[in-house]
Image: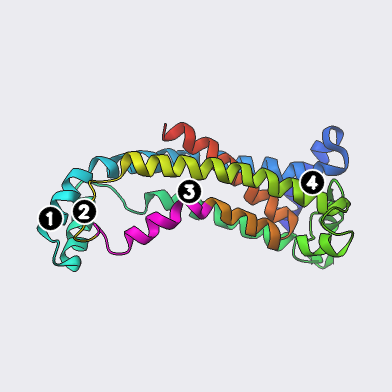
């Protein structure tokens, strides 16, 4: 972890002339962008996989009619079809899974008061008036929602809400355009109907993340979510 903390500190030192006291926050944004750039090939592959899954919908509709009274056989047949066409149902999860190590490193770095037996100097850095190691609850206890630190979170919440609404509308539009022929006898895969109803609202979960995590980790999530919104808008256009 100390190596990672040194990396963030070095990035902050490089950005100091441009961003001053917010250099560490800028370093986190830059680090997040670099991580997303590294996993971009996986995102492109996931987009191709998603388009391939959409192309399979007519065949899945036929399987649905054939096995409409046997959900277990239907699920096995759908999985066999994906294997035959070399389409992975989990391809869309790979970009998120590959980011997890970087996110957890950042989270733990800004959740510990000491690193390598010495004081964690990164906790002294701020995004404007909000310390990167603090949470929203700390800001509320120190000046309230409209105090100096609280206003930083208000700005983040507003930004996340705009991105979430954009993602919500795009997801709803994609689902309406790419949804298979509706049926009344069951779902192509058990439980998929419930997932489809919840999926458009997942973007708003970032608001909860910003509220409960250290500000540094929240910055990572906000930057990554914004990157995803732009990336998916381009790849799935």
Q: Secondary structure at mark 4?
A: helix
Instruction: Examine the structure image and report whether residue 201 is included in the region drawn in magenta.
Output: yes
- Left or right: 48, with 58 as reference point: right
**Magenta stretch bounds:** 187-202
> Residue drawn at (42%, 31%), measured in percent from left and top?
237
Q: Quadrant of residue 71?
A: bottom left
Q: Nearer the viewer, residue 30 or 196?
A: 196
Q: Nearer the viewer, residue 38 or 145?
A: 145
- Left or right: 172, with 104 as reference point: left
The dot on residue 235 is: none
Q: Residues within 10 Å of mark 1 (few under 14, many from 20)?
A: some
In this view, the mark in front (2 or 4): 2
The dot on residue 24 is: 4
The dot on residue 65 is: 1
Q: Nearer the viewer, residue 161 or 92?
A: 161
Evaluate whether residue 5 shows in this view: yes
Picture coordinates of residue 49, whole percent (x, y): 33, 43
Q: Residues within 10 Å of mark 4 (few under 14, many from 20)?
A: many
Inter-mark Cα distance, 4 to 3: 25 Å
């Amino acid at each position: 972890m100390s190596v990672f903390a040194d990396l963030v500190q070095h990035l902050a030192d490089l950005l100091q002339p441009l961003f001053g006291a917010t250099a560490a926050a800028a370093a986190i944004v830059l680090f997040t962008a670099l991580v997303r750039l590294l996993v971009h090939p996986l995102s492109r592959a996931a987009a191709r996989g998603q388009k391939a899954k959409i192309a399979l919908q007519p065949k899945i509709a036929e399987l649905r009619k054939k096995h409409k009274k046997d959900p277990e056989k239907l699920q096995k047949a759908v999985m066999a079809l994906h294997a035959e066409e070399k389409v992975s149902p989990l391809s869309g999860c790979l970009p998120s899974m590959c980011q997890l190590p970087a996110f957890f490193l950042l989270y733990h770095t800004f959740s510990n008061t000491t690193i390598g037996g010495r004081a964690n100097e990164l906790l002294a850095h701020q995004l404007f008036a909000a310390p990167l190691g603090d949470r929203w609850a700390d800001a509320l206890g120190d000046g309230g929602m409209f105090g100096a630190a609280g206003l930083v979170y208000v700005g983040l919440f507003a930004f996340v809400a705009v991105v979430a609404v954009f993602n919500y509308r795009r997801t709803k539009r994609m689902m309406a355009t790419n949804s298979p022929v509706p049926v009344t006898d069951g779902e192509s895969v058990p439980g998929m109907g419930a997932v489809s109803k919840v999926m458009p609202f997942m973007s708003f979960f970032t608001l909860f993340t910003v509220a409960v995590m250290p500000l540094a980790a929240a910055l990572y999530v906000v930057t990554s979510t914004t990157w995803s919104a732009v990336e998916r808008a381009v790849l799935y256009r």
